[in-house]
Image (cartoon, rainbow, N blue to C red):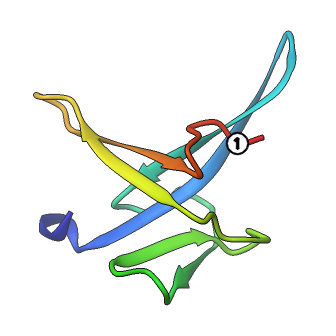
Amino acid sequence: MRGRGGRLYVWTKSSRCCSGRLTWLEASTEPGEGRAFRRVDEASIELYVPADLSRLPEELVVEARGRRRRRLEAYWDGCAWVI
């Protein structure tokens, strides 16, 4: 992450499907296009979350996945999906 600026952006992404609305987390070292973020001062890294996020999760876990094409996966409060 430090090789890409040391910043982490985490946001929610939603989609509609046959059973209703589905919301999950996205994470990147680049901000999501067209989104407003705010910095979390309590974090030990340079962490940015959506500006309109009403409450911070108690726990945020970020994992680097993939061997050839590295990608970030985020989980907060134990969930990859937001309810």
Q: How crowded is mark 1: few (under 14 residues within 10 Å), some or many (20 or more)?
A: some
Query: Residue 38 location, x and y as percent?
Result: 59, 80
Side of 25 where 13 appears, left or right: right
Q: How many labels, in total?
A: 1
Image position of 55 with respect to 32: above or below: below
Residue at far top of view = 18
Identify the residue shown where x is 62% and y is 61%.
34
Side of 66 where 41 appears, left or right: right
Image position of 31 with respect to 37: above or below: above
Query: Residue 10 location, x and y as percent?
Result: 51, 58
Residue at far bottom of view = 41
Quarter in which the N terminus is drawn: bottom left
Between 65 and 7, the one lying in front of the other is: 65
Quarter in which the C terminus is drawn: top right
Between 71 and 60, the one lying in front of the other is: 60
Query: Residue 32 location, x and y as percent?
Result: 52, 57
